[in-house]
Amino acid sequence: MTGSSLKDCSTCTACELASNRQTVVISRGNPDADVMLIGEAPGAQEDVQGIPFVGRSGRALDQLLQEVDLDPSRDLYICNAIKCRPPKNRRPKKAELASCRSWLDLQLAAVDPKVIVLTGATAVEAILGIKGGMTQLRGQWQSWNGRSVMPIFHPSYLLRNPSKAAGAPLDLTRQDLTAVRRRLCER
Ligand code: URA
Ligand code: SF4
């Protein structure tokens, strides 16, 4: 069992990822935000700095958010399904996701977001329990414990698919994030 308070997360050793990490990467942004964005796991930069989404993916994410008038430090609380970097950025294992889940649940309870944005298949699987291609899943509102959930492409996928054409992944993600911003204005 992991601890019961989020402040214990930074010393967690509940799964094997503890042995290779430099820092436990918990969150950035606003703990009072209406939107909680959940990614996969920390990468190299995040592991060093102890802050989620600060590498290339993070810069791409922040830029997209700003393009749709969402301020990453005011309008969102940003975290990952897994708090420690997997070796060579491999995908988190099921057991690791399960071990780390209690921290994510503490974050969800503390932030109590109106909308959850899931970036990439790992976050979708962690929260919604569904496996599938993001091309099918993205852009479709889902519901989880009374909260609106929007799956979007992972920013690392957008970096590999940089086309600016209408209907390309970047454009679709901008549409999905615009839908998120609009939902915040609804009751
Ligand atoms: N950086 C993160 O913090 N999370 C990701 O999912 C990818 C990069
Ligand atoms: Fe603990 Fe999560 Fe890090 Fe595993 S990944 S050691 S469960 S904080």
Image: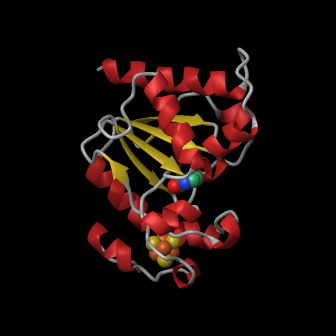
Spot the residue most to the left. 32
Q: Is residue 64 above or below residue 182?
A: below
The answer to which of 38 and 51 lies nearer the viewer is 51
140 vs 25, nearest the viewer: 25
Q: Quadrant of residue 44?
A: bottom right
Percent from the top left, x then y, of residue 77?
A: 36, 45
Residue at image position (68%, 37%) is 158
Q: Is residue 127 above or below residue 47?
A: above
The N terminus is located in which quarter? Answer: bottom left
The answer to which of 186 and 66 lies nearer the viewer is: 66
Q: How is the image coloured?
A: secondary structure
User: Residue at 29% across / 48% down in the picture?
Assistant: 111
Q: Position of residue 104 (x, y in %)?
A: 42, 59
**Which corner quadrant holds the C terminus?**
top left
| Res 157 visible | yes
**Residue at horizontal 64 percent and vertical 32 percent from the top:** 138
Instruction: Classify 69 as above or below 113.
Output: above
Q: How many marks?
A: 0
Using the image as rendered, state which of residue 68 and residue 144 is in the foreground: 68
The x, y position of residue 67, in whole percent, is: 48, 23
The quadrant holding residue 11 is: bottom left
Left or right: 106 with respect to 45?
Answer: left
The answer, for residue 42, to whether it is visible in the render is: no
Name the side, left or right, on which 33 lies relative to 123.
Answer: left
Q: Residue at x 72, y 31 (%)?
A: 162
Give residue 184's position: percent from left, percent from top. Answer: 34, 24
Spot the residue most to the top: 166
